Image: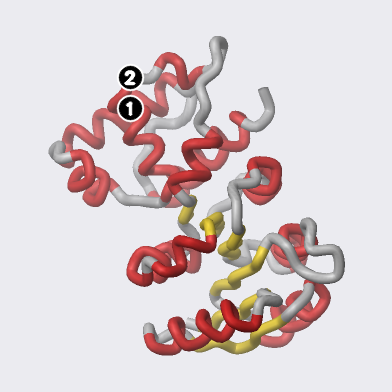
Amino acid sequence: MRVVIAEDNVLLSSGLELLLAAKGFEVAAVTRDGPAFLAAVAEHRPDVTIVDVRLPPSFKDEGIHAALRARRLHEGLPVLVLSQYVEREYARELLSDGQGGIGYLLKDRVSRIAEFTDGLRRVAAGGTAMDPEVISQLLLRGDNDPLSHLTPREHQVLALMAEGHDNATISDRLAVTDNAVHKHIGRIFAKLGLPAANSGHRRVQAVLAYLDHRQHP
């Protein structure tokens, strides 16, 4: 699986290269800024990309804008964004196109190697890998929010779905049966006015559409 990285921190980018190589990924290019990242994507056509939110020259939001532009130029390009902190506006921008192949993880998550590489593979396959802390920020309840109609268990199931977990993993995490998870998901989609379907693509569409809605009260 070919990867292009956009990360200006040499220590982190070198660590990512070594980690990914050890896990069977091919790092096609490591870039330090947005323009170089876009050029590398065009040249190597990677299976997945890893992008730091903050890149030179201003270290504000160049990385997120480079990721968004890359997805516009290369439709469906899988992007896993790394951030030092939860930045809700950047997460909203990333989710706003309603497509899969999206990840948003805090940099601390990289040290959990199996979790990080599993998330990267999910993103490459068109799924999602959202940091639990990001999910907790996005799924804040409001008085008139559809989320207020969900039960505590349905809230847990939706949060795990948004992180990118499949039904079997959710079942294991919550110590409930697969059938119970299936029923919870059906009720969640019904309460949110979303199609009650379990196919991977429609599932991702539903979760992303809902998370994007949460950012447009």
Q: Residues within 10 Å of mark 1 (few under 14, many from 20)?
A: some
Q: Is 178 or 114 nearer to us in this picture?
A: 114
109 relative to 43, above or below: above
Assign a secondary structure to mark 1: helix
The image quarter containing residue 68 is bottom right
140 relative to 68, above or below: above
Q: CA distance from mark 1 to mark 2?
A: 5 Å
Residue that appears at 47% across and 47% down = 204
The image quarter containing residue 12 is bottom right
Coordinates of residue 196 in the picture (x, y in percent): 38, 31
* Scheme of colours in the image: secondary structure
Q: Using residue 95 as the reference point, say whether residue 200 is left or right of it.
A: left
Assign a secondary structure to mark 2: loop
User: Which residue is tagged 2?
Assistant: 151
Q: What amino acid does circle 1 point to?
A: Glu
Farthest residue, direction top: 143
Q: What amino acid does circle 2 point to?
A: Thr
User: Which residue is tagged 1?
Assistant: 154
Residue that appears at 44% across and 88% down = 21
Residue that appears at 64% across and 41% down = 88
Q: Is 84 or 177 nearer to us in this picture?
A: 84
Coordinates of residue 87 in the picture (x, y in percent): 65, 46
